[in-house]
Amino acid sequence: MKYRIGIDVGGTFTDFLLTSEDGTSEIYKVLSTPDDPSVGLMKGLEEMAKIKRISLREFIQDVETIVHGTTVTTNAVLTRKGAKTGLLTTKGLRDALEMRRGIREEQYNNRYLNVEPLVPRHLRYPVEERLDYKGDVLNEIKESDIFDSAALFKEEGVEAIAICFMNSFARPDHETIAAKIIKEKYPDIYLTVSSEFLPSIRFYDRISTTVLNSYVGPILKNYLTSLLQKLEDAGFKGVLLIMQSNGGVVSPEIAMDYAAATLLSGPAAGPVAGIEYTSVQGYEDCLTIDMGGTSFDAALIKDKTPLITTEGEIDRLRLALPMLGIVTIGAGGGSIGWVDEGGLLRMGPQSAGSKPGPACYDLGGELPTCTDADLILGYLDKDFFAGGKIPLNYERAKKAIKEKVANPLGMDLVEAAAGMYRVINVNMASGVREVSIKRGHDPREFPLVVAGGAGPVHAGMIAFELEIPIMIIPKESSIFCAAGMLMSDLKHNFVRTYSARLDDLDLKKLLSLFTEMEEEAFKLLKSEHIPEDSIEHIYSLDMRYVKQYHEVNVEMAKEELEKGDVGLIASKFHPEHNRLYGYSLEEEGTPLELINLRLLSIGQTKKPQFREEKYAQEDPSKALKKKRQAYLPLKRTFEQVPVYDGHKLRHGNRVEGPAIIEQVNTTTFVTPEYSVLCDKYGSYTMYLKAKEIEVKERLGISS
Amino acid sequence: MKIDKILASVFQRSFKSITEEMSIVLTKTTRSPILCEAKDFVTGLYDGKGKMLEQTENLPILSFSLGPVCEYIVNYYGDEIYPGDVIFHNDVFSMGNQNNDVAVYKPIFFEDKLIAWAASKGHQADVGGAVAGGYNPRATEVWQETLRIPPVKVYEKGKFKKDVWDLIFANIRFDMVAADMRAQIGSCVVGERGILKLVEKYGLDVFESHKAYLFDSTEKMMRAEIRTIPNGIYQGESTVYYDGRTPGSKYKIKVKITVEDEEITFDYSDTDPQTEGFVNGTYTSSASATLLTFLQMVNPDMPHNDGMIRPVKIIIPEGTILNAKYPAATTFGNHLCPPNADAIIRALSQAIPQRVTAGWNQLLCYLTSGYDARKKDNYVDIGFLGLKGGSGGTSGVEGYDHIGMIDASGGVLDQDYEMFEQQTPHLLLKHEYWPDSAGAGQWRGGLGVETKFKIRGEKTKVVTFGDGDVEPPFGLFGGKDATLNKIELHYPDGKVYKTTSKDLVEDVPSGTVLFQQAGGGGGYGDPYLRESAKVAQEVKNGIISLNRAQEDYGVVIDPKTFEVNLEETKKMRKKKNK
């Protein structure tokens, strides 16, 4: 038997999805080991082998591919435990990194501090050199500055170096000279050169991103080197791939050089999974939500393509690499409910985390959380949380909610718990609005893919708030990202700045820049063993109206670009601007300008095939476990609702709301307005009752 | 009607989210850098009577500027407000805050009833008047500064009024302004959609009653905050230097703050009379400054709606420098915020010493304009990156480095350096923290910034406006004062001209270097109490000199290792304490 494994290392659990060549799949979870995540990872592999009653060596020899999502880089930034980094930058501008363009995010808060820079001022070394805005040399580079900096960095014990000079996007020469000297003096240092790493305009964006890469590079390099060694020692002969923030995977060797591309990779596999789970039903678009213990991620997919942004941030530091446009808000099972001075109920953003956790965990937590409310409302079973592994204490939940929410609001326990449930749902709904409405899309037109342990308890009311008629709850919803990793392709992003008015466009230059990027792409993908016919290129242009400051990215086919038809390019821009911002200036004849050329190169990977189940009629009664009291939010009352064992539901079974479906790792609350149909892969489609015929058609179930 | 307290939370969250959407539209679509880069605009929602529902205030000085005009418009048109109307406004003598801040109001109707307003206000690149950009230090009356736009409909009942539109834009220099005003209308449409969706979903009665509950709840929150300030009368004053006409001129701002249980009154009755020139405030800009300064001393996590301002009374007699009489010139009015804030801080430092900051760096800004031969086009550039000095330290927390004037409190962003060199012909030589610029203190002030660039291009004009070049930001409770602002032009022939704080220099030759120092913020508490390791770190980082470490902080540091000489430091600090 040949296997493929997706491994997602989270804050609390490391999730595994094991798929076999016969189409079966299995879920595993082990506790994460934050000090060295590879310990938990190897332990998980051992446990899987144990369950299969074979040795780790026998098991791992059959593993073809491991796709791994890691947060070692993310954690290094959040805890400021990255490499000691030195920076070479243009003399006179060495504080740009720390200034962050002078923003204070909380304007009315005088106790709000700037973030600590990743490179302290004394390691930001000013170099005499200067290029002008088009890359012409105004001041030759003073090489002795580079030698001096290398000496200082050695003395200080610097472990990584970043180079970013003013206007280097237009000409790399000075950075190349500096890099050469550094490499001679410091052959083994981790080095990031901005003109190679991110040759695009905007100094702060480039310097911040370049420094982030050097800061986390050595960390990722050490981690992956040691992991590869451990896997090799265990007998692994397959391919290891690493998840990136752009929703694609990459070989470990390349990941080590582009370490910053993994910084926001945590939730990046979710949208990829969303595409797979919805496309089997014939959808091209979807929204995905993933509600964990502390955070809630929402993403939008249009034409099977997740939204990409270059406006990312990590810990208030600019990260200008292309990444999936995922909105993360502080809402999860651990979100704390509280009443503010004006008597308004709030949920989060503070979270009880996993320690002390919700009050009902009985681990010392005394503050009421979302999970406590879910328990009081009857959505969770105190004896079947995590399949019974974590017993929940009802009295603790009750006490916390009474004292901290119900009494201050002058409400009874249930009203208060229902209020908490409602407020957090509204918060999450506004996260969904942010990825849809604020970007010009109507959420009602998208099926909502629901993931995360706590997601399916809340999805019904989030969808109701947004008037979304159809939800899909994948069988692998609790390990959604691990599943998405197995479905991801290799992806590499490239960028060149070419600033010109569209009327003055030099087509030859534009095409040669694209060719340059294509060549780089082929080289990388070749090193990852991707044959040329499995490579796809996506071309796009960042453009704006003359004198605007923000660009709109417009995708173009290669043939369209080769035509050099400026009118055609413009005709793609205007409608996109109109869709995003409600108007275009086509009629006014406002000229356009080009800023960046972007290339996304995709190498197709082999995807797992899931086994289809035989149709087993509508009646779900074989899966019926019992009945229990659950709160119906719109009716504002408890009612006796049936509880089903999700593991016993079969293809075609239909569960009418109100109902609860329990699985080991997640609970689904089917609100009275919705029903659930189980599809042939074991996923649930939850739909407004009026939509039943449409849903059945999509699922190929005749009514 | 029974109030669903939870639904009130839902409304609050929704209002906020809608105004944020409105704000995103403006950021992404406007072209004037002061809007899209510096975000000098505010978006908001108001109820049918013009009372604030919620706002997104990118620049706090605009926080109080939309509501009063909305109420004015409601009265002005009476029952002649129709669905599909779009109203423009900038007039400072009908509650506007500044001529350049032009507002768009869109009434929102539900079943033929006026239920709310969506509005946006942004600093426009030009508003007519004698000088491009509106800054005219020579102005003595409003018409020299601007085209006055009292409430005027550019759409009525959904019909575009071409003649009115053309009349307005025939009097404004740049085409960009018309495009940016369109973007503002777009933002209001987004706001209208959001409100209607809510009302359609919950019904008008529920909307109205829960809105009222929300106002009351926020009022309660503000009252609770005011209650934490000891009752009493607190007085503070500050000085405005140079009215742009008479060198050496000075004006006093005096505030008497009365705290009585749950209410607070700011009374400016003893403030000096208005100036002859453009250094005058309007009621709205001055009250906005008062409010934003006060809001920094209470819990920042409070909904911004009408309830918040109910327990706050602001008295500014007409004819004072903070509330000039018709037809005064007032373009400088928003920039009276820093001295106004100083007066308030000085007053409240007697009541809530733990919550006030030391003095902030005051605004001093340059504006260059001219012809860029590379692009065969004119340009205007406001020096955001150069103007941002430090904020004052406060109890337990340092001042914020390079944050800029208190009117913006870190809401205005620097131009990106590379975009600056694309959009203007200039060459940036330096933009770095200014060492030793911060006021020393147990909690030091924020650092100021030094900026240097070579002016290139043709027909260059340099305008300056601001203050802070006479009196430095003050230290508090033993903290030291910080440094002054300065702008100099270093001409190619070697001559140096130090500008005044309200200046206009024409025909600046290419090759001239503009040098600006934006000062730091004042220090808080005795510098001798500052942790010596912190001082050593800052010396190592080159933002405090060895000498100043010794003189101001009594910390002796080894110049090679940057380690604290504990013994010497102890001796030094003891000596002073004797």
Image: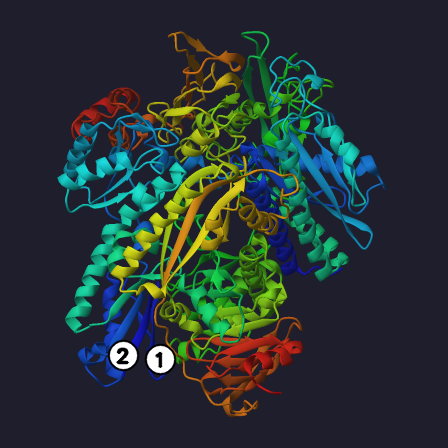
Q: CA distance from mark 2 to mark 1?
A: 10 Å
Q: Relative to A466, does residue B491 appear above or below in the rendering?
A: above
> In the rendered image, which residue does mark 1 sit on?
A26
Numbered tag placed on residue B270 in the rendering: none
| Position in image of residue A204 (x %, y %) | 39, 38
* Quadrant assignment, res A99: top left
Q: Residue furthest front?
A: A563
Q: Position of residue A61 (x, y in %)?
A: 20, 77
Q: Where is residue A339, by image quadrant?
A: bottom right
Q: Is residue B449 left or right of residue A548?
A: left
On-image quarter of the C terminus of chain B: top left
Where is mark 2, residue-wise?
Answer: A48
Between A407 and A620, the residue placed more toward the observer is A620
From the image, which quarter does the N terminus of chain B lie in?
Answer: bottom right
Give percent across and percent down for residue A170: 36, 36
What residue appears at the point 63 percent right and 66 percent down from the top-left corner? A467
Q: Residue at x 54, y 36 (%)?
A: A546
Q: Residue at x 51, y 69 (%)?
A: A449
The chain letter for the residue carrying disc 2 is: A
Measured along the vertical axis of the image, is residue A491 above or below residue B526? below
> Contact (CB < 8 A) between labels 2 and 1?
yes
- Can residue A615 be seen here? yes
| Three-letter residue code for mark 2 | Met
- Amino acid at circle 1: Glu
In this view of the protein, which residue sits in the foreground, A177 or B12? A177
Provide residue A329's location: percent of width, then percent of height: 48, 56
Earlier-in-chain disc, 2 versus 1: 1
State whether residue B153 is above or below residue A58: above
